[in-house]
Image (cartoon, grey):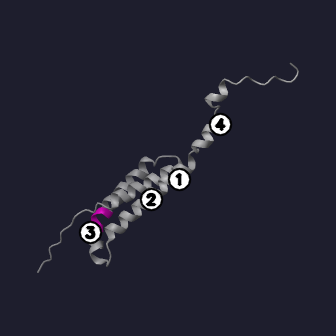
Amino acid sequence: MTTDLTVTNSAAITPLITAGEGLVTTITGNPLTDNATKITRGITSVLDGLLPAVAERVSFDLDSVLAGVTDVLTGLNKAVVAAKSKAPTEAAAATPSASNLNQPTSPQAGE
């Protein structure tokens, strides 16, 4: 007696790994090295193959949980990018406005 096992790759792992890589790159300011990228691709491949078997044995929707975690990582990446960026009001205050360019300069002391 044999058991037929249908194996399909999960679409949830690859986006999760990609979101994690993006967050690490944003935080460190450096892209992953070639070796790190090779390692994450190998792990992604293994997990993509194993996830359907694991998902059958848990009592919750594992794909949805992983999709939610991916959304969280993507949101964190956006928050880190925003935190590292200057606010538009700060950038505007740092440069003179067009209305100030036509104003006469104040006389220097001693003129």
Mark 3 lies on residue: 52
Q: Are marks 2 and 3 in contact (CB under 8 Å)?
A: no
SS at mark 4?
Answer: helix
Q: Nearer the viewer, mark 1 or mark 4?
A: 4
Give the mark, 1 or 2, whose residue is nearer the N terminus: 2
Instruction: Tell me the residue at 66%/25% (across/down).
Output: 101
Instruction: Tell me the residue at 65%/38% (across/down).
Output: 93
Cα distance, mark 2 to mark 3?
22 Å
Neighbour tally class for label 4: few under 14, some 14-19, many 20 plus, Cα within 10 Å: few
- Pick the front one: 74 or 23: 74
Amino acid at pointer 4: Ala
Above or below, 30 against 10 in this view is above
Amino acid at pointer 2: Leu
Instruction: Tell me the residue at 58%/45% (across/down).
Output: 87
Q: Quadrant of the N terminus?
A: bottom left
| Numbered range of the magenta stretch | 47-51
Give the mark, 4 or 3, whose residue is nearer the N terminus: 3
Mark 4 lies on residue: 94
Neighbour tally class for label 3: few under 14, some 14-19, many 20 plus, Cα within 10 Å: some
Give the mark, 3 or 1, whose residue is nearer the N terminus: 3
Q: Nearer the viewer, mark 2 or mark 4?
A: 4
Residue 13, x across and y down, in percent: 34, 61
Amino acid at pointer 1: Val
SS at mark 1?
Answer: helix
Residue 6, x across and y down, in percent: 18, 69
Question: Looking at this rendering, what residue extends furthest in the top direction?
Answer: 111
Amino acid at pointer 3: Pro
| Left or right: where 94 falls relative to 70 | right
